[in-house]
Image (spheres, rainbow, N blue to C red):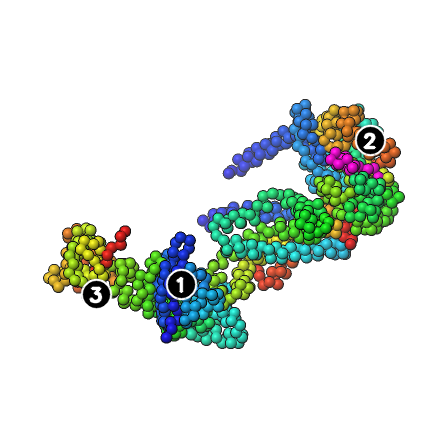
Amino acid sequence: MRAEAKLGLALLLTPLLMWLSLLIFIPHVDVFLVSLRERVGVGQYQISFANYLTFFQEPLYLWTFLRTAVMSSLATVMTLIIAFPVSYYIAKMIKGRAQSALFLLCLVPFWVSELVRTFGWMILLRETGVISNVLQYLGLVDGPVEMLYNDGAIMIGLVYTSMLFMVVPLVTTLESLPDEVIEAGYDLGGNGISVLREIIVPHAMPGIVSGCIVVFMLSLGNYLTPTMLGGKESLWFTELIYSQFIVRFNWELGAAFGFMLLILSSAIVWGMLKLTGQSLEKTMG
Amino acid sequence: MTADLECIDLEKRFGDTTAVDRVSFSVPQGSFFSILGPSGCGKTTIMRMIAGFLDPSDGDILIKGKSVLDVAPNKRPVNMVFQHLALFPMMNIADNIGYGLRRAGMGKAEISRKVDEALDRIGLPGIGARKVDELSGGQKQRVAIARCMVLEPDVLLLDEPLGALDLKLRERMKVELKALQSAFDTTFVYITHDQSEALVMSDNIAVMNEGRFEQVGTARDLYYRPDTAFVAGFVGDSNRWRGRVTKLDGQNLELQSDTGMPLRGAIQGRTLNLGDVADVFVRPEAIKIAHAKDDLSHFDNQLSGKVTSLLFNGAASRVIVATDTGHGEVEVNLPQSGEFADLVKGSDVHIGWGSDHGNCFAAEAS
Amino acid sequence: MTKQSFAISAAVTVALMGGATVANADTLRLLTWGGYAPEDVVAKFEAETGHTVKVTKSNNEEMIAKLRATGGGGFDLAQPSQDRIAGPQEEFGIYKPMDMSKIDMSLFIPSMLEATKGNTTVGGDVYGVPHVWGTSGLVVDTANAGMVKDYTDLCGADVAGKVSYRLKRPTLIGFAFSMGLDPFAAYGDEAAYTDIMSQVEAKLIECKPGVKTYWGGGDELMGLLRSGEVVASMAWDTGGWKLNDDNADITFVAPAAGALGWVDTFVLPAKGKADDAAYAWINFVMQPEVAAMITAAAGNFTASDGAAEFADDALKAKYQASFPQEAIDNIKWYPPVPAGLEAIEGGVLDRVKAAN
């Protein structure tokens, strides 16, 4: 009987372990091994940390990573600020059909590919685009305004792409907050701000944290939006990785970059969790 | 002395439906007032209007003689204990109780002194640092009350707070709530659909049905002198028959039930005419049971029958008797004397009651 | 399951998979550029030979990256530019030599075939034959930016804020020629090449404020030029000619320093499994009538001898307008890129992008 139970457990775990090892673990090990190779001649390689050294010694790479991390954090905060009232409205202020309809509305942009969404923003923001023309028509500006090809455009694109991933966990946690707890907050003398600060936000914290982690990682790993909407200086770390792998044929450095992205972004998320006094278990549980 | 809480012609309409229909009542200082009614009768709507979460369509709410209609819920001298208590799970017990004081801008030292005092008062000293989910149901109950009472409200509203507790705890909390109320000497307004909660704790009870108050009075009034058929049926258990009035004799009358059983009852000052359809309510404990017919000779309602079931429930044990004439079944309380301990299914018994225990009401036109 | 039955089923599985591979030999997995395998050509080829064609569209860098990832597997025929064959072959060994006896050499323009063979020879083996050729240079809105005649003219004050180019190696090469340098001559000399590139880097950083944006894809560039947000840009000849259909002012201009000429080739990936189908495809598309169909779809001319007769007259006219005889003579054909140059260029491009 015990042996059978063990076999059953093994059979149950096999697909999971296969999935973990084949799709996650082995590729990462492979990337790590590639990152340790240094090209010494045509088709000749030796093991060294030269690629990692390059990352730390070239200010451009570090600066690009920093820029990517800071802008991703900013995008995360902005997404949170915009998504929170939206989620609160969906979770608490409306019921029934209107609720599902609004939730669905948040989902609609995801029925088209990211490329199409980004093109949509390009049509809106460009110098000869919709917004520029409307502003001119209204007489608010004298000439065409260029809103594309700068960091602001990247921000808009990132926030837009990330919205759903913030709204879903927020709506879920906010829905689990009983109305009467909020009412109790008011009944005992709280006003809107203090109820938000002391009751709603602490309750929604797991949703906020998991939403922020997802949005931060998605922004950090985004490629299309920063390259298409960004301006002449808008380097994004994933762009560096792509160009090392594809344009420069330098897989070794690209792999090292990829690994640094994994380590540094994990470190940032860990630091943020510590800073806000949250733990991953609490957030996921 | 002005009442702590007074509602005048309070009305609330949601679209076409009237949830609360011109309700007026006043609650004197320091008393325990209950609103008792089935779910959907409008009692929660009244409570939410008093707390300020809903605006009345019409009428006025006065607290200590002053209208509070223009006062926001967080400024009203009224606090509420919610159905599921609504303790803040993200705070510990001390922060829960101190929440309202913090909002009022009280100093830290004084808050912690008041919180400790409140914890002492509810008999749970030293639990301030605990988390909400570490407490038992009864402890949470007391914390929820303490959280309101530290604010020294003029009126404390309680929205079926015992509903979520198990039966044993509910029985104990009834007594405890009453004790807390007299200890704090605050006006409690309590809403419930559970008549025993209302009967045990309240000084005054309003029985509510379909948006209206049917009767306001003490537990004793409601039980023994119901004003309406609804109150008679809703408060306590009753045998209920419907029939047509066949004879009127002052306060007493005779009627023939729909199943053909002759019954005698009393109208207690209400008006009924010959030939009217009426409902008769007789409490099981008003009906006497006997082995011999002669023992019941002084009752003007007498029936013979067979026991069809025995419902043993300790002091509240009952039997159901099917009349020999085949006119129906009667629920009767068993005396505690032990005299009827040998009763079995199928035993022949005689039952009887006085006509003044048969409360008669004109039947609703349904 | 017993041991024997397991062994049998395993053998059956292997046999089935082996069978599948044999059946797949008739499928030609073609890794190519957009427009090089138009549907009508594919349909005609499948009808005539019975092979089926699976087309994957890509570009030079991705083609090489894909083949490198699989060690030259996954495709039966690829079409990188001729300058990107020798270097990657030496470094990664992702191609296999061409069997010239299986190719109908009479279909090719002899001079182009010889040049490509020379450029793609590694260790005595020929790895590529030419297919489509074209140039990159300038696309100019002549009404608004008639003064732009050379790559460095893109830095002019008259067109500041209204020009665009890619941050890719053609820009580096074009600017170098325009600055009077010869990067191709320095291909074999890393120090000299680094020196040229650092001069180009300085020039590009100096020009940066006047650039509207560095374009990334053909569609984006088309949008910029069509809307008038950009009046002059580095681009391919076909892009200019396409825009010329919509707006007669916009056209391709061969820069004074010379247009950059490229030749896309046919190569056999090292682990290709359908060589016969691949040779059949090469011999099929090099027929003049078929080559003309490809020219109509891609907008570029092919190395097919005699195909020009079948080409569209409007396209020929545009070509002649953009390329007077001296411009044709001045085309700078990309020589094979030695392995390792990309690292030097990559550093330059990164620094230009990061510069403020």
Work out whether disc 3 and disc 2 sit on a shared chain.
Answer: no
**For the residue labelled by badge 2, is the local secondary structure a helix, a strand or a loop?**
helix
Residue at mark 3: B336
Q: Is residue A241 left or right of residue B280?
A: right
- The residue carrying pointer 1 sits among few (fewer than 14), some (14 to 19) or many (20 or more) residues within 10 Å by Cα, namely some
Q: Which one is closest to the eye, mark 3 or mark 2?
A: 2
Residue type highlighted by circle 1: Gly
**For the residue labelled by badge 3, is the local secondary structure a helix, a strand or a loop?**
loop
Residue at mark 1: B59
Residue at mark 2: C320
Work out whether disc 1 and disc 2 sit on a shared chain.
Answer: no
Point out the residue furthest to the front here: A139
Chain assignment, label 2: C
The segment highlighted magenta reads C240-255
- Which label sits on residue B184? none
Chain assignment, label 1: B
**Image height check: is B214 above or below C332?**
below
x%, y% of residue C20?
A: 61, 31
x%, y% of residue C203?
A: 84, 49
Q: Which one is nearer the viewer's eye here, C198 or B152?
A: B152
